Amino acid sequence: MTAAHLSARGIPALLIDTAERFGRGLAYSTRQPVHILNVVTAKMSAWPADPAHFATWSGDDGTTFAERREFGRYVEEQLAAAPLVKRAGGMAVDAERDEGGWTVTLSDGAKVAASALVLALGNQPPAPFPGSDGLPEQRFVNNPWSDAAEVAIARAAESQSDVLILGTGLTMIDVVLSLAAAGHEGRITAVSRRGLVPRAHVSPPGAPSPVSLEEVPLGSLMALWRWLRIRSAEVGFRAAVDAIRPHSLAIWRSLPHADRRRFLRHARPQWDVHRHRIAPQVAEQIKGMIAAGQLDIIAGRVASMQASADELEISIARRDGRESVRRVATAFNCTGPLGDIRRTADPLLRALLADGEISFDSLSLGLEVDERSKAGPSLWALGPLTKGMYWEIVAVPDIRGQAEAVASDIHKELLSHG
Ligand SMILES: Cc1cc2nc3c(=O)[nH]c(=O)nc-3n(C[C@H](O)[C@H](O)[C@H](O)COP(=O)(O)OP(=O)(O)OC[C@H]3O[C@@H](n4cnc5c(N)ncnc54)[C@H](O)[C@@H]3O)c2cc1C
């Protein structure tokens, strides 16, 4: 979207990504119809100035949860309509600063010169699960978004073998839906510290209950949490959580550093399941699988993992003190994207880190950026990489504004440099 906004301002933009991902990225390159958006079409426009754009494109009343691959097709169309956007297929592996700006090197050795560089690399795959090194890769799938994960899902469905999922959030939901769509009927166990599962949207949505920023307590996590609990009891948690979304940046910025850390350590799991809700029909399916005993959600932690010839034996220390042992053919690491970019496998981020061009933010959520999303001179970052600065910068309704603001900032800088 940044590229499309640049094009609209008369600035040529070159996108670097693998061929099948232009405009789709990780979330929207899924081929699975069961992977549907967790936001209604009315809120998924790519264009901040035209919030109904995607709903109109979809031809619905805005209350539908469309397929993610449809949204990918929509973004691709927006990109195709931007005349000054070009594409280079491949991985960016290095970026060197020079007088004109940047020279970016691609994995095939090709070099690209640019006046400005935007890092829109999205979510980093999860860090390898502790204790998983040494386990056979086809049994323990560390990256649930990889081609290897698709193969493992197909294999589990074919053999109807039991599966273990580490993590009980949105990625777990995706893997469960993919297994079910592939015809898997074996038992699925999903484990996380608290065993919290994303809550559901309701259809039709309840009445909104907006609040002004003045009503929200700023500067203290305790005060904010207490207020949110009371408000949730009054208007329901969905309306209460949604009402503070427009103020999320002001709230985040008002919190002392220690409170932001406290939020990440203690409140984040609760926040995530109430904030990132799933479509009602997905929630129904998950509920049905739990009721049928096919999906078992456990609050606990992995105590040990061992591989034998044809299975993994995983012992789980449950929160209630008991121990459960699962023997499964496959396990998936669905603990969420890597935040600490010091551990990233992305070659471009590694090169920029090594050269001191970028640094990690103090909460290890991504990159250090300023209020203009700048990570350095002539260098911008977008989306999940900028969570340390903005926190709520993961979903389309938030990122689209950032994409436009960054394009406008680049335009201004280029004009000022003549
Ligand atoms: C599974 C999933 C489902 C989601 N569902 C929703 C939803 O329903 N609604 C919503 O609002 N939000 C959703 N989100 C969140 C949000 O839409 C995405 O996080 C958002 O698309 C991020 O956009 P992005 O352009 O920053 O990154 P991405 O869309 O992830 O794109 C980053 C791209 O960078 C490429 N890349 C990375 N490193 C390099 C490199 N070195 N060289 C070249 N290319 C590279 C990757 O291949 C990838 O294609 C979802 C996220 C995920 C992961």
Image (cartoon, rainbow, N blue to C red):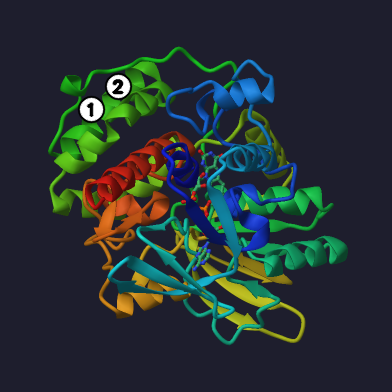
Location of residue 26 (image quadrant):
bottom right
Amino acid at the residue labelled 2: Arg
- Circle 2 packing at 10 Å, graded few (<14), some (14-19), many (20+), is some
Q: Which residue is mark 1?
A: 227
Most distant residue in the front direction: 418
Q: Position of residue 269 (x, y in %)?
A: 39, 48
Amino acid at the residue labelled 1: Trp
| Local secondary structure at mark 1 | helix
The label number, if any, that marks residue 231 in the structure image: 2
Mark 1 touching mark 2, by CB under 8 A? yes
User: What's the residue at 58%, 67% (across, down)?
Assistant: 143
Location of residue 255 (image quadrant):
top left
> Which one is in front, 414 or 260?
414
48 is higher (above) or lower (below) than 34:
above
Q: Position of residue 369 (x, y in %)?
A: 25, 55
| Local secondary structure at mark 2 | helix
Q: Is mark 2 within 8 Å of ligand 1?
A: no
> Which one is in front, 211 or 280?
211
Q: CA distance from mark 1 to mark 2?
A: 6 Å
